[in-house]
Image (cartoon, rainbow, N blue to C red):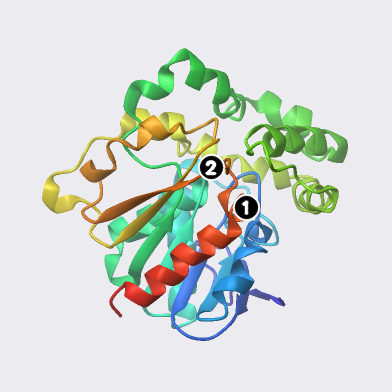
Amino acid sequence: MAGMRQEIAIDGFRLAYERTGSGPAVLLLHGWPGDRTDYREVAPLVASAAEVIVPDLRGFGESDKHQADPASQYNAAAQARSVIGLIGELALGRAVIAGYDIGSRIAQAIARDRPDLVRALVIAPPLPGIGDRILAPQAQREFWYQAFHNLELSTQLVDGKPDAVLAYLRHFWSHWSGPGYEPAGDHLDHLVSVYGPPGAFAASIAWYQAGAGSVAASLAEQAPDPGDRIAVPATVLWPEYDPLFPRAWSDRIGEFFAAAELAWLDGAGHFSPLEAPGEFAAAILAAVRTSPD
């Protein structure tokens, strides 16, 4: 898949992306610590029946990584602006938007603020409804990195140091994945190539410095009035072995979504597009077939 580049900058940021297939539009939004290659197994499966666009988000991969105020330029709303700009530039119309990790939060932001652009969502955790359960001791043993990313020490220790980037990212890719998955060496080498240059790791963690991480978001969230729930159809794919988001935290989805269907991804951990690509792609294709144009 040949890489392309957004022509019209949004807030000064241009996104790199890949575009394959033809048919109804599907956007795939990656997570941290990944990039658009998170969907290298899913995209070919979906491109058989849809036009698939897979961008690198702001601050990731080959997209722009500007030094900018995180709270205004790297939060969910800012990331959503770039994706919305790409939808407009490519004249995609209403798209099925899929995402996991931070990509899920961004997909939800687009569906909440611009439902006219979204046919359906296919998302994995995080989902709203966690609340102060994220402060429980077991949860905090997993979410330590979000506080660490708000310390200047994190960039001093990791940014621009490929060996440190490799060790740091390998921890998450190994620890967050299910028992049957281990990241391939060439995939880790690729991630080091995009997270290792000076400034790249720092840009990737601006999301957390913006207060967009799950700890800050969960503590700030409030269930909307019934009429203000996300109205577009949503399929929620919840893994079995995600140490960040236990299945018990799926109990309040109905408070935030008007039409959500919950499905279990048995055997998978956090990195669902790579650990369960067949199931992830099947859910997207089902949304393409059944959601209104």
Q: Residues within 10 Å of mark 1 (few under 14, many from 20)?
A: many
Secondary structure beneath dot 2 equals: helix
Q: Residue furthest bottom?
A: 22
Label 2 with label 1: CB-CB less than 8 Å:
yes
Of residues 231 and 281, the one nearer the viewer is 281
Q: Which mark is residue 207?
A: 2
Q: Percent position (x, y) of residue 165? A: 79, 38
Of residues 169 and 254, the one nearer the viewer is 254
Of residues 18 and 41, the one nearer the viewer is 41
Q: Quadrant of the N terminus?
A: bottom right
Which kind of residue does numbered mark 2 sit on? Answer: Trp
Residue 15 showing in the rendered view? no
Is 80 positioned to the left or the right of 37 in the image?
Answer: left
Q: At 27% from the left edge and 62% from the top edge, which residue is drawn?
A: 232
Q: Percent position (x, y) of residue 289? A: 38, 76
Q: Residue furthest top?
A: 137
Q: CA distance from mark 2 to mark 1?
A: 9 Å
Residue 157 showing in the rendered view? yes
Q: Residue furthest right?
A: 163
Secondary structure beneath dot 1 equals: loop
Is 162 positioned to the left or the right of 227 in the image?
Answer: right
- Where residue 163 sits, quadrant-wise, is top right
The residue pinned by badge 1 equals 59
Q: Is residue 288 above or below residue 159?
A: below
Q: Percent position (x, y) of residue 167? A: 80, 33
